[in-house]
Amino acid sequence: MDKLYSLIIIFAGSVLLGFAFNMFLLPHEILSGGVTGLAMIFGLLTPVNTGIWLFVLNVPVFILGWFKLGKVFIFNSIFSVAVTSISMQYIPVMKVTEDVLLSSVFGGVLVGAGAGFIIRFYGSGGGFDIIGLLLTMKRDIPLGFLIFALNSLVIFASGFIFSWELAMYTMASIYITGLVIDRIHTRHIKLALMVVTSKGDDVKKKLLENLYRGITVTDGEGAYSGNKVKVLYSVISRYELAYVRPLIKAVDPNAFVSISETMEVMGNFRKTDNFKKTPGTGGSL
């Protein structure tokens, strides 16, 4: 059921991408970035549909991702690109509005939303999404910002081929896309977790059984009550918070939990959100 749910989200996000391309961006020759942007350029300059170019240009990137990100991720990505490509064959290329700025803004929002959910459910729209994900595994850089930086190359290409005015609209659209992706894909955000509990051993055991994270345990004492407690400290990713909350609550509903965002993490911290094999915890990048 989890896999089916993920595929449904990826399918919906991919159709949303096709809708955004054909209804907002392509009619005004506003490009997306990376491989998708190159496909849109080739689609505008040749009689071959953009959706077909999108699939062809993604083949070498998929081969790279197969070795670095795994079979499931590449399968989901191929599924996403195929759905986007097919949807672009059937969704008409037409202008929703004559205002280029509005089209670039709404197109950027829709592309960011579609791409963000696809990435969150362990897939990608191919192209620079995969390259960006590979780079974020090495450094905690916001994915949306990284994709925006990589896609700037396509913006300059579109300026020479079409016009610099459209290139600037493209820049605005890609920037908005990056912002929306970072609102949805929040893996780079790290949280400091502190748990004060009278059931320290049980909470520690539960967390260690379900997360690949280190935990520091210290003794504590309630200043008012004088009760002896355990203080557990760890750093987790933003995604893991959804799984940590019910784990702690199930063991000690009265535990005091403090969660705060960290600016930087140094030392041995896993860059991927790897959950141990518990129901419903597989999948998100």
Image (spheres, grey):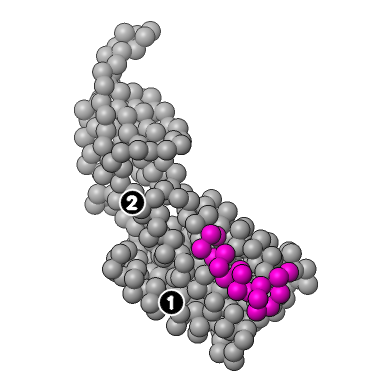
For the image, the number of numbered tags is 2
Viewer can see residue 16: no
What residue is rendered at 49% in x and 79% in y? 54
Q: Is residue 131 magenta?
A: no
Name the quadrant containing residue 220.
top left
Identified at 35% across, 38% down, the residue is 266
Q: Is 164 placed left or right of 176 in the picture?
A: right
Type of amino acid at the residue the image marks with label 2: Thr
Query: Does the residue at mark 1 contact the one at mark 2 (Cβ under 8 Å)?
Result: no
The majority secondary structure of the magenta stretch comes to helix
Task: Tell me where the magenta segment starts and ends, as one range.
Answer: 148-165
Query: Considering only vertical position in the picture, is 285 above or below 211?
Result: below
Type of amino acid at the residue the image marks with label 1: Asn
Q: Quadrant of the N terminus?
A: bottom left
Query: Which residue is depicted at the point 55% across and 90% down?
Result: 48
Is 272 left, or right, of 15 in this rendering?
A: left
Q: Quadrant of residue 264?
A: top left
Task: Locate residue 108: give its quadrant.
Answer: bottom right
Q: Is residue 94 above or below residue 8?
A: below
Residue at mark 2: 272
Quarter occupied by the C terminus: bottom left
